[in-house]
């Protein structure tokens, strides 16, 4: 363990670093009991019993069917986590952002597996009886769970209801698509279509696959994964979009700011280390914003060093040159490329420096840039703050 994460989401290096073996109380008990899984221990047993009781017919017992057992373990684990999160009155409700989204996914995944098992006959409120079992089991050492039981149950039931509505909408859309899908002699549903259901209705891919299977079809999962990956890359790189689209209509000053982002990127790596990577940027004719990965706030001293490195590069009036090469050649020549960005086979590389060997900064980038750094003005950092977990943001101007 290296860092302490504070309430602002900043990672502060620990005074004493240590090795985390993952040997928590659950694993310790499992080993002391001579069991092979944490789910066999008395910690999980009552939770799993609550699930067993809720499966109609009483026919199923944990350990009797590998696939059902897996669903039971997922439900037990996710309901327990969700109960602990919701048991903290300061914790967020399920939502589409940040920690609320993690919670939403935990609950929805548990619901999905609950439906698979026919838990609570597939109706809403299938998770709250399990949450009650969690609270009973843990209320001794964690009295806040019992104190906040009403909230836990209400949020779980509410989220479950919302998710079931989403599923119904998705199923309805799927049924509308079905007559056309069935015309395909190969009986394959396109992955792009499954992605559209996911993207528009929040309809999980597993359910598209399930419904497809019920109708003797398969979903092209490779195509879905590809669409999903592209979508993620797009949202990740949107911060860097301004570089690809060019800055033509924003004028001379925006171009200067763009060159300044390269100088800043390099200066940050010189002062803080090579783990610094650009996470986004935003440029107007008046100022620039630059997001980058770094675990802790910058000290006044570090900020000063970064600022003067950039100003030094400006004062030296370094030439900026562009070369076209393959991405491999670019990285071999020391150019920084944005991680997760998709590049063409040939890329533009902008170098700020006296020669191709002796340079200050080199980056794969679409441009445009100034021809010389002189005349960019004086670089001034106005603010340094947290942008998100592990990402810092610098606002700066050229005066
Ligand atoms: Zn650039």
Image: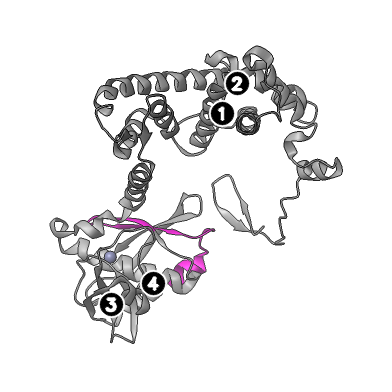
Q: Which residue is mark 3?
A: 351
Q: Which residue is mark 4?
A: 266
Q: Are marks 1 and 2 in contact (CB under 8 Å)?
A: yes
Q: Quadrant of ligand 1?
A: bottom left
Q: Are marks 4 and 1 in contact (CB under 8 Å)?
A: no
* Boundaries of the magenta span: 279-308
Residue 148 appears in the figure: no
Identify which residue is drawn at 74% across, 31% down: 44
The quadrant where residue 367 appears: bottom left
For ligand 1, tell me if the residue under mark 3 lies within 8 Å.
Answer: no
Q: CA distance from mark 1 to mark 2?
A: 8 Å
Q: Is residue 294 part of the magenta span, yes or no? A: yes
Identify which residue is drawn at 53% across, 31% down: 109
Residue 197 appears in the figure: yes
Q: Which residue is mark 1?
A: 110
Badge 2 crowding class, 10 Å Cα cut-off, few under 14, some 14 to 19, many 20 or more, is many
Q: Earlier in the sequence, mark 1 or mark 3?
A: 1
For ligand 1, tell me if the residue under mark 2 lies within 8 Å.
Answer: no
Front residue of 61/389: it is 61
Identify which residue is drawn at 76% across, 41% down: 26
Quadrant for the C terminus in the image: bottom left
Q: Earlier in the sequence, mark 4 or mark 1?
A: 1
């Amino acid at each position: 363990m290296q860092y302490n994460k504070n309430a602002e989401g900043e990672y502060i290096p620990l005074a004493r670093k240590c090795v985390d073996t993952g040997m928590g109380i659950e694993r310790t008990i499992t080993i002391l009991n001579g069991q092979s899984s944490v789910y066999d221990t008395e910690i999980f047993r009552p939770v799993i019993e609550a699930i067993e009781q809720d499966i109609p017919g009483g026919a199923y017992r944990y350990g009797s069917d590998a696939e059902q057992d897996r669903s039971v373990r997922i439900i037990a684990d996710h309901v327990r986590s969700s109960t602990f999160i919701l048991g903290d009155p300061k914790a967020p409700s399920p939502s589409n952002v940040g920690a609320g989204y993690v919670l939403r996914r935990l609950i929805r995944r548990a619901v999905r597996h609950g439906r698979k098992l026919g838990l609570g006959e597939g109706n809403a409120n299938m998770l709250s009886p399990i949450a009650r079992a969690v609270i009973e089991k843990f209320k001794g050492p964690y009295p806040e769970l019992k104190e906040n039981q009403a909230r836990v149950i209400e949020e779980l039931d509410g989220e479950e209801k919302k998710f079931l509505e989403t599923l119904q909408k998705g199923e309805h859309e799927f049924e509308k698509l079905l007559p056309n899908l069935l015309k395909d002699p190969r009986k394959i549903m396109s992955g792009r279509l499954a992605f559209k259901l996911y993207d528009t209705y929040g309809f999980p891919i597993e359910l598209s696959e399930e419904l497809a299977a019920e109708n003797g079809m398969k979903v092209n999962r490779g195509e879905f994964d590809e669409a999903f990956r592209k979508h993620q890359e797009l949202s990740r790189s949107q911060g860097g979009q301004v570089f690809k689209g060019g800055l033509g209509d924003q004028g001379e000053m925006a171009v200067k700011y763009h060159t300044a982002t390269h100088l800043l990127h390099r200066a940050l790596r010189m002062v803080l280390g090579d783990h610094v990577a650009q996470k986004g940027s935003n440029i107007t004719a008046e100022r620039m914003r630059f997001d980058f990965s770094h675990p802790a706030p910058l000290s006044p001293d570090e900020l000063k060093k970064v600022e003067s490195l950039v100003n030094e590069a400006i004062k030296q009036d370094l030439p900026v040159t562009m070369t076209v090469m393959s991405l491999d050649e670019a990285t071999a020549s020391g150019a920084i490329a944005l991680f997760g960005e998709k590049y063409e086979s040939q890329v533009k590389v902008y170098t700020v420096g006296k020669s191709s060997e002796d340079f200050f900064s080199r980056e794969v980038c679409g441009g445009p840039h100034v021809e010389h750094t002189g005349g960019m003005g004086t670089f001034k950092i106005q603010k340094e703050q947290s942008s998100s977990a592990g990402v810092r943001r610098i606002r700066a101007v050229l005066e």
